Image (spheres, rainbow, N blue to C red):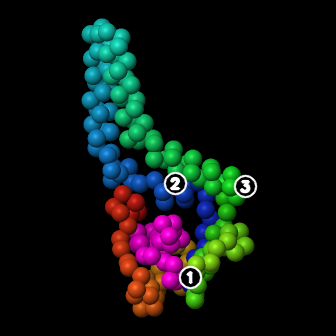
Amino acid sequence: MFQNEYCMDINRYRHWTSPILTKAKGFRFWLLLTLIGLPTACVLYATGAKQSFKSAALLITLAAFYRGFLFRPMYANKQFRLLSAQFKKKSWMTKVVISDTIQLYMDGELNNEVQWSQVDKLVEAKSYFDLEVDGDYLRLDKATFTQGDAESFLTYMKERHPEIPHQEEKPEFNR
């Protein structure tokens, strides 16, 4: 039997759901647009170009900066606020008990029970495991096992559930 317990709050949620900035898809494109747009806007302002050109250059720079640097963390914040509103809490204790079934507890109350036949795959990152169930996932923080540990859990999965495929997390989320 394994147990994993952690406090889900905005910082943990943002860390787990926002990709590593420099590894995110499209980051180089948005960075390039920002690096081209800002000097272009400065040159246009210095030379006294038409206002429409200056506005366009600033708009492109602003859009590129927002999309490349701010969008993903802001989107994660919005998702967490929706979860918080749904549960009427700003943070909650999550406990996952793994035995013949997988039980998810929130603040000590059983929230969900999953059968092993429902688990589609095991995804491993540097700091967590994801058990994917119907397009959603149960996340286990490697550092917060209260019974068992991350290495023995991985061994357990390979020995007891070899039918569940195991894969590495995408590089932009693998922290």
- The one nearer the camera, 80 or 116, is 116
Q: Which residues are magenta?
A: 115-139
Q: Secondary structure at mark 1?
A: strand
Q: Which mark is residue 12?
A: none
Whether tag 2 and tag 1 are in contact, CB under 8 A, the answer is: no
Identify the residue position indicated by label 2 in the image: 14
Where is the N terminus found, in terms of image quarters? bottom right
Q: Residue 166: in sight, yes or no? A: yes
Image coordinates for residue 83, horizontal then vertical, percent: 63, 55
Image coordinates for residue 104, horizontal then vertical, percent: 63, 74
Q: Residue at x 55, y 78 (%)?
A: 145
Q: Amino acid at mark 1?
A: Gln
Q: Residue at x 36, y 29 (%)?
A: 61
Give the foreground label among 3 and 2.
Answer: 3
For the residues labelled 2 and 1, the Cα–Cα distance comes to: 28 Å
Task: Tell me if residue 147 comes above or below residue 172 in the rendering.
Answer: below
Give the mark nearer the N terminus: 3 vs 2: 2
Identify the residue position indicated by label 3 in the image: 88
Give the mark nearer the N terminus: 3 vs 1: 3
**Corner quadrant of residue 27:** top left
Q: Amino acid at mark 3?
A: Lys
- In this rendering, position of residue 76 left or right of residue 167: right
Q: Which mark is residue 115?
A: 1
- In this rendering, position of residue 12 left or right of residue 55: right
Task: Say few, some or many: other residues with alpha carbon within 10 Å of mark 2 (under 14 / 14 to 19 / 20 or more).
Answer: some
Q: Amino acid at mark 2?
A: Arg
